[in-house]
Amino acid sequence: MDIDSLKASKKTDQLFLVCVDHYDTSHATFYYYKKEEKWELVLQTPALIGQRGMGEGKEGARQTPIGEYTFGKLMGIASDPGTIMPYHQITEDDYWCGEQYYNEFVDEKTMDHSHCTKENDEHLIDYTKPYEYTAFFNYNKECIKGRGSAYFFHCFGTHDYTMGCVALHHDIVKYLFTIIDEKTIMIIDSYDNLYKY
């Protein structure tokens, strides 16, 4: 893969690519490229994406949103693996909101969450396997209702698909959490469309 030909390669020294041959699959390939003197492939591994593949992000679509993203909040049920970015260890008080604070992290110890029914929220600590390590990638960071919420980069769960997130093997996510920084870019798209980035 010619990483130098991507415009995104001029903005970072770490690129994650989540690629498929066609959009209607829940199985993708994840690549981690790093630039020292030149771009080199550090890691290639199977990934799981949305049950309905890749597409436009929106609430209930079960598709992983196509695009170029940086990383926001890094968190997990497990203790901090040694992240560069701030890390939050998930507690019973933590939610990802699908209502009042749409697509935002909510800590009930510090925020008034009483106006939410919680029917559309994720109580993060309940996702014991996938959210052992989970990071919000900055899709819909404007928090526009209906565009989709809780798109995460996390560990494999119990299914061979996600609800729209990107999932990798637990040990790989744990490792990647130690190298992700504010400039790390993740591109999600088909191989044929990578040239757009």
Image (cartoon, rainbow, N blue to C red):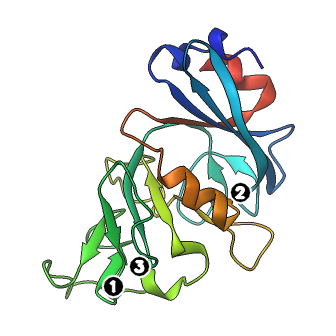
Classify mark 1: helix, strand or loop: loop
The amino acid on which the numbered mark 2 sits, given as a three-letter code, is: Ile
Three-letter amino acid code at the position of disc 3: Asp
**Residue tagged by mark 2?**
49
SS type, badge 2: loop
Please report the residue visible at 78 percent of the width from the left and 48 percent of the height from the top.
45
Q: Give the percent coordinates (x, y) of residue 51.
A: 75, 64
Q: Position of residue 80 (x, y in %)?
A: 39, 67
Quarter holding residue 190: top right
Write the residue at 33% across / 73% down.
Answer: 99
Q: Which residue is mark 3?
A: 121
* Viewer can see residue 102: yes
Dot 1 alpha-carbon crowd within 10 angstroms: few under 14, some 14 to 19, many 20 or more: some
Query: Residue at (62%, 40%) from the top-left corner?
Result: 66
Q: Residues within 10 Å of mark 2 (few under 14, many from 20)?
A: many
Q: Earlier in the sequence, mark 3 or mark 2?
A: 2
Q: Which mark is residue 165?
A: none
Q: CA distance from mark 1 to mark 3?
A: 15 Å
* Callout 2–callout 1 Cβ contact below 8 Å: no
Q: Which residue is mark 1?
A: 91
Q: Nearer the viewer, residue 39 or 103?
A: 39
Split into 4 quadrants, where in the image is the C terminus? top right
